[in-house]
Amino acid sequence: MRHGQAENNIKRILVGRYKESHLTEEGKQQVSETAELLKNMSVDKIISSPVTRTIETTEIVSKILNMEYSIDDRLYEIDLGTLAGTQYDEVIEKHGDLFLEFYLNKKNSVLESHNVESFSSVRERIKNLLDEIMERHHSKNILLVTHLDPIKAAISNILELSPNALYSWHMRNAALTILKNDHGYWSLSGVNFMSSKRYLHE
């Protein structure tokens, strides 16, 4: 589950993992609606990224499902280095399409000069977490509450999507990406699963 709409999503600010950004009222409503869908999915365990907007998301879900949750740093948002706190459109205007370069894992790029975590690093930590879940919780339904790029990393580990496909694939706030593991193999069962009324407007 991606976190609900946060202030940085509205303001188009790159905040990364360390700068705080809280859920908007709309974001809280999105999360509540998705949590109602989760009631039908027999969730056994909730694990959250430690970032403020994901914790706020997880606390809403936890309350609605009446479950405790734990934190795992592998679900962190990407580290944006010195780009954290900058305005997305200004960054694109100054440097061009940096985030396509992110998925291309280009070396010696502007991203690297700003100490931005590589996509290959995100993929590795998410793969490590999924492997652990497969080993320890293979018969359980685990809800991971995280961010845009860790979700894309999970999908790319399964489907081996091209950088261009990853770049153009948008994960909606508070939407579910449903992964299934059968006999040690992951498959993708659903993307952007959310309340039906949202499909008409987003």
Image (cartoon, rainbow, N blue to C red):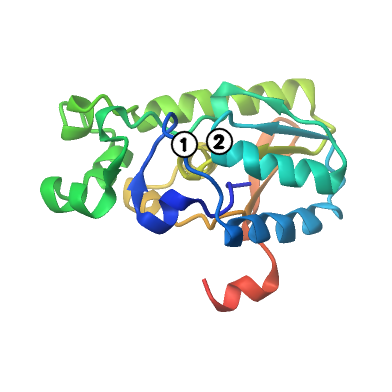
The amino acid type of the residue labelled 1 equals Glu
> Which residue shows up at 72% across the image and 40% down it?
59
Residue 64 vs residue 173, the one in the foreground:
64
Q: Using the numbered discs, state the Cα–Cα distance from disc 2 to disc 1 in whole angstroms.
A: 6 Å
Expressed as whole percent of the image width and height from the top left, the position of residue 14 reads: 34, 43
Expressed as whole percent of the image width and height from the top left, the position of residue 80 reads: 33, 32
Residue 82 vs residue 96, the one in the foreground:
82
Residue at the left extreme of this rendering:
94
> Which residue shows up at 44% across the image and 31% down it?
17
Res. 46 image quadrant: top right
Q: Is 103 situated above or below 73?
A: below
Secondary structure beneath label 2: helix
Mark closer to the chain start, 2 or 1: 1
The answer to whether residue 76 shows anywhere in this view is yes
Q: Which residue is mark 1?
A: 20
Expressed as whole percent of the image width and height from the top left, the position of residue 63 reads: 81, 44
The answer to whether residue 97 shows anywhere in this view is no
Secondary structure beneath label 1: loop
Q: Contact (CB < 8 A) between labels 2 and 1?
A: yes
Q: Which residue is mark 2?
A: 52
The amino acid type of the residue labelled 2 equals Thr
> Which residue shows up at 31% across the image and 39% down it?
85
Q: Is 155 situated above or below 132?
A: below
